[in-house]
Amino acid sequence: MELVATTRRTMGRLFAAVGAVVLAFGVLGLATPAHADIVNPEMPFKVSGNVQNNGEPVAGVTITVTGGGGFTATVPSGEDGKFVVGVPEKNADYTVTLDETTLPDGIAVVDNPNTPDFVEGNVQTASVGPGGRVAMNFFIGQGERHTVAWIDQVVQRLISGVNFGLMLALASVGLSLIYGTTGISNFAHAEMVTFGAVATFGLVHVFGDAALPLAIGLAIALSAGLGWALDAGLWRPLRKRNTGLVQLMIVSIGLSLAIRYLYQFFIGGGTEQLPGADSEKIQLFGEVSLSIVDMVSMGLSILLIVAFAWWLTYTKVGKATRAISDNPSLASASGIDVDGVIRIVWIVGSLLAGFSGILWAYFRPGIRWDMGGQILLLIFAATTLGGLGTAYGALIGSLVVGILVEGSSLFIPSDLKYVGALVVLIGILLFRPQGILGRKERVG
Amino acid sequence: MDVLGILSSTASFILDPTTMAYALAGLGLAVHFGFAGLLNMGMAGFMALGAYGYAIGILTFGLPWYLAAFVGIGASIVFALILGIPTLRLRGDYLAIVTIAAAEIIRLFLLTSAFVDVTGSADGLSGFNGPGGTVTNPIAGAGGFNDSNPIPDGEYGFPPFLDDERTWYLRIVGGIILAVGVYFVWRLVNSPWGRVIKGIREDEEAVRSLGKNVFAYKMQALIIGGVFGALGGLMLAFSTNVNSGVYVTSLTFFLWTALLLGGAATVFGPLVGSAIFWVLQAFLGLLFPALAKAGLLPFDSIQAAQIRFILIGVALVLLVVFRPQGIFGNKKELTFVK
Amino acid sequence: MSSSDKPTTPVKSTGLHVGEIKPGVAKKDPILIADGVRRQFGGLTAVDVAHVEIPRNAITALIGPNGAGKTTFFNLLTGFDIPNEGTWSFNGKSLAGVPAFKVARMGLIRTFQLTKALGLLTVMDNMKLGSTQQTGEKLWASVFHFLWKKKDVEIETQALDLLTRFKLDAKKDDYAASLSGGQRKLLEMARALMTKPELVMLDEPMAGVNPALTQSLLDHILNLKKEGMTVLFVEHDMHMVRHIADWVIVMAEGKVVAEGDPYEVMKNPAVIDAYLGSHQDVDLGTVTGRITLPKQGKEK
Ligand SMILES: Nc1ncnc2c1ncn2[C@@H]1O[C@H](COP(=O)(O)OP(=O)(O)OP(=O)(O)O)[C@@H](O)[C@H]1O
Ligand SMILES: [Mg+2]
């Protein structure tokens, strides 16, 4: 992957605001955090920190620490985004500089010299005190937002939320259908999401950047194939064995772990980018801007969701799917081929999940082995919010969750933005545990 | 390939603090799931509270380490109460999703930079175990966990268990907590109380119809299991720094794998399961890279070290499908109620 | 009668009611009174009981066609379901809003139509769960063996006694999951009796139990009555109802449509209508009866 030395102020705005959290504090003889790269370990005092993009560790970023007496040390951030530098003195100030040219393509620290009201975000001062905990926090992405008009921020977040919500919807309608027809709380859905992105990445690798549309098309087809394979190879045999629902849930957890680490095996623990992740932004009004990728991805989501809704409402298989969600035994008694329909549900669900994974890769941005797992609970939240097992509900639920997550970062620290959605998830399960359309089971 | 080296580092994992932490938390899961039928998928949250409660108790509140340990345990009890009061009425799979979400909320709060002064954010916390380790902490001062170690400095034991006084102290403390814990749980589940919670696992309506306060029993089980989770976290905190990156959902899933390996509805299952889990982890984590280096596997050694994580997932699937009672569990005591 | 277990001839309690017999008639000594209890599932009104009283120390049968609302009524009375409206009381104490386990502790125990044997517990453990006197069920006491061991032995003797009566003693160490359907019914009934209830509500206790055993269980129920217990049971077998019940309450479409002495009530046009619709010339016993019981009931 090429690391182009570019600093694009606009790019830092929406998706790619680098939450480059440079936490610098001095602790006497601090034990090295796991994985972090360390230089000068023999020195008695330490400056350490963290490079993160939206809560995601960014590896391989060059950090330079300079101090009095000509001290200078350079360290790359570790696999977990951390770095530790041994320094010779306490009660002293050190300058920590993040070399932006080593950031992955498409993300940047905002430090445009044309806007003098910004601190140079990638240069920080760390004071190693007499001991104890001195922690300094620099949210470069946030500092920048202060200059954007409130209404623009709201609109920007709203658009972003809808975009995110549509992407979630693609994943959650599939999860919802699967839950409705088979009763499985499918934790491996996260990996079906990741699959779309990873497959696209692999195909681009083979065919080249120019063949991106072809790669995406093929990846979606492969996603559908994955759904087929999972049902044929695993879920159908388990259905035949009459495996209990709790067991099926734990099987899906095991499957999720296995596939997740399989991805890590192939693409490693870092973040990869798809071509076009740094596409041009178009100014809409005020400070509100959207990249071409955003627009295309929203358009495609809507197209796919409409097609899906049409399929579910008007086709024979779609109707059968809803019938099975409603009452499986009645459906099979009235001559519906339940097994066949479930197979199709897995294929459609996996296809949609794969596509949403591709969009997620652009939204984050970046491809990671556990990227699906990062939004799994949000997908669950969306599905539950709309009423478990009802596809249309999942659609609404996704938009609510998307807007909630993106909107909440206007009020709370952005690294807590998922909390709101999780609280909603818990709340819904508490107050309408049977879902919106579900019925309470009878006793006795 | 250093076969002996691999075997010896592997064997040392039997007595590793991490193994003991898993065994303790696994014991908690056994109480939750194996005996009371509660699908707790948020054990990592309980462990995080145990570890962070302890560390924060020392670093922020300046408590002595043994009192700080009770902060961790107390935090897990409060969490169990907050989680249990509304959720214990929920159906099994909903409880799973609620607990997993609650554990994630805890992790996000520990990770956020909003409370960095207390939680250390992404860096986590360190230096709370006192001088015996690597750090003098000005707040905790002397008298940290490491200082309470009565064993004179030096190397003890025999290979592969030839280790310094701190490691031995950890092993002994962990061993005592585990032994007491196992005895306590064994007593509990073989008592009339245990009979009631096993009944609840099978069919709570039936137990309710016999006049038992099902909710109270479930709450007690949730708290007891949660305290064991916190003890597991505490054990981890005794041995190393705390970091929110450890208490992720995968930790809960690994615990489940270890639990199901040993047998969920058994008292010794979590112990045996954790030992097998970690010994296999250590073994495969060394074996595959060694094989790769020797040119016997066609990938690099980083990849080779990751194969074992794939195998955890595969093992979990196979266990649940083919041996739900665990390797040593009683076939009749299958724990999955249909 | 000539079998080894000599069946007791039921001693019917009479004069249970006050005034003219009609649905909701007052009883001399009611143990359970329900007033205006209504439960709806969406558009369907499953139970809509204006007024009903259950006589103390008598065997009352609750009958009615499938879907009449009998099980739902049981659920409502015992706190397993919450009605949309209504009040009901047990021994003069209102039960509205009382959770199911407290209802059970007050001495009102029910069994389930769909059996709830605790499959992965042994038969004996199932029985022991029924006991209400085990302090070892408290968390703090449970870890101290000596606090509850003696009581457990006592409970075990008690349980064995009941199991023998229910012909389950040979199975006491087996997992309940290995029992047959009928045996599970028996176990559930025996377990309910372990609580020593004042009023026991049995939902189709004899469904799936073979005739010879049915006879001996009926004797057992009659003994319970002798000991002062009150029994309310749901049953579709009219012969059995006639044989054993002192009083019969008939439900149809959620309402109590008739009450009375078992012989009189089956002649009631409302009952025949509810059960038979157009086939009104058939005897109710032959339509719903499953077994032929000794005739002594009818001749009495
Ligand atoms: N949880 C529920 N949700 C919806 N409808 C229900 C529920 N429970 C019962 N019903 C309906 O209420 C009506 C009464 O059911 P109930 O089980 O009380 O009948 P019953 O008299 O016990 O019948 P049976 O003799 O067959 O056992 C039925 O029509 C049933 O379908
Ligand atoms: Mg019924």
Image (spheres, helix red, strand yellow):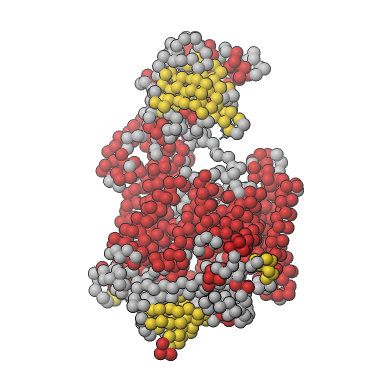
* Residue B316 visible, this angle: no
- The residue lying toward the viewer, choosing from C187 and C64, is C64
Q: Is residue C203 left or right of residue B16?
A: right
Ligand 1 lies in which image quarter?
top right
> Residue sitting at 37 percent across and 37 percent down?
C128
Above or below, A215 relative to C206: below
Above or below, B98 relative to A122: above
Could you say where residue C279 lies in the image, as x and y percent from the top left?
66, 17
* Residue A285 visible, this angle: yes
Above or below, B338 relative to A79: above
Q: Residue furthest right?
A: A315
Q: Is residue A285 left or right of residue C299?
A: right
Q: Residue B211 appears in which quarter of the rendering? A: top left
- The residue lying toward the viewer, choosing from C192 and A55, is A55
Q: Residue A33 appears in which quarter of the rendering? A: bottom left
Could you say where residue A31 lies in the image, as x and y percent from the top left?
38, 75
> Residue sitting at 40 percent across and 90 percent down?
A69
> Residue sitting at 52 percent across and 56 percent down?
A420
> Residue sitting at 69 percent across and 53 percent down?
A344
Q: Is residue C47 left or right of residue C101?
A: right
Could you say where residue B60 lies in the image, as x and y percent from the top left?
34, 65
Could you say where residue C185 lies in the image, as x and y percent from the top left?
48, 32
- The residue lying toward the viewer, choosing from B110 and B274, is B110
| Total marks in image | 0
